[in-house]
Image: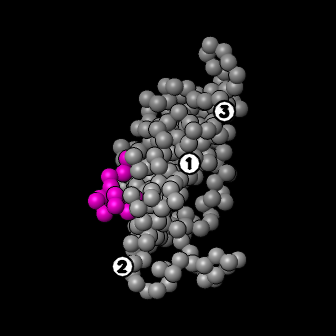
Amino acid sequence: MKIKILSLFPKMFEGFLHESIVKRAIEKKIAEVELIDIRTYSLEKHHHVDDTPYGGGAGMVLAVDVVHRALTANCSEKSYKILLSPQGTPYHQKKAFELSSKEELVLICGHYEGFDERILKYVDEEISIGDYVLTGGELPAMVLTDSVIRLLEDAIKKESFMDDSFSTGLLEYPQYTRPLIYDGDEVPEVLVNGNHKRIEAFRKKESLRKTYLRRPDLLEKYVLMPEEQKLLDEIKKEEQR
């Protein structure tokens, strides 16, 4: 997969691209990430990429002509173009899986007060990583890039992400490691007895419990199997005690 990131501040990605899973995926040629400075597509003498908004108001607006030139120069028919902004569709794990199947992603980092609405004509999708406002789209671009790259074949072991929170529609079950006992807290006995069937049942129930207690909204969209419904009923009774 190739990911092209159009940004006004490409240096912000230097550390991100040279650490951890993203770095290894690039070195193994599983993914290729190209940084593109939007300013190089400005025709202004001082490479201005923004202007004051029509109708008045505070701040500066990212210009449509500059972004369109950058897209024209760097996109092809296989490019899936995404504008990152707080007004976009909320990002989730299902979308990460969907995007991981694309051949090429082009991420546009919004900035300043906002962007000329006409930019939307030239993109395939507008995505938000949450209901809050950041200085620009660089951090959201890193979030999206990381979440997609880790799903690519051979980036990490498949079993490492198949039980991740949201991958199954539920939050992930609790995890433990050594020491067995710390500060009076002991690892649940079921996890150290070697009975894989019991371990699987424990993890399913605790995944449901964590989702029920922390993100009940997820359960509203999750289709429970009969055995899962039975476990959830047990959990509700246990939590009421």
Q: Which mark is residue 112?
A: 3
Q: Main secondary structure of the magenta part?
A: helix
Q: Tell me the crowding category of disc 1: few under 14, some 14 to 19, or many 20 or more residues within 10 angstroms, Cα based.
A: many
Q: Tell me the crowding category of disc 3: few under 14, some 14 to 19, or many 20 or more residues within 10 angstroms, Cα based.
A: some
The N terminus lies in quadrant: bottom left
Q: Which residue is mark 2?
A: 197
Asked if residue 23 is positioned above or below residue 212 in the image, the reply reads below
Q: Position of residue 105 (x, y in %)?
A: 45, 49
Asked if residue 175 is positioned above or below residue 82 in the image, the reply reads below
Distance in Å between CA atoms under marks 1 and 3: 16 Å
Give the left or right position of residue 222, taking residue 148 as reference.
Answer: left
Asked if residue 187 is positioned above or below residue 138 in the image, the reply reads below
Extent of the magenta region: 221-232
Which sits earlier in the primary sequence, circle 1 or circle 3? 3
Q: Nearer the viewer, mark 2 or mark 3?
A: 2
Which sits earlier in the primary sequence, circle 2 or circle 3? 3
Tag 2 near tag 3, CB within 8 Å: no
Q: Which residue is mark 1?
A: 141
Distance in Å between CA atoms under marks 2 and 3: 54 Å
Q: Amino acid at mark 1?
A: Ala
Q: Position of residue 175 (x, y in %)?
A: 53, 71
Which sits earlier in the primary sequence, circle 1 or circle 2? 1
What residue is at 65 percent from the left and 40 percent from the top? Answer: 134
Q: Which mark is residue 94?
A: none
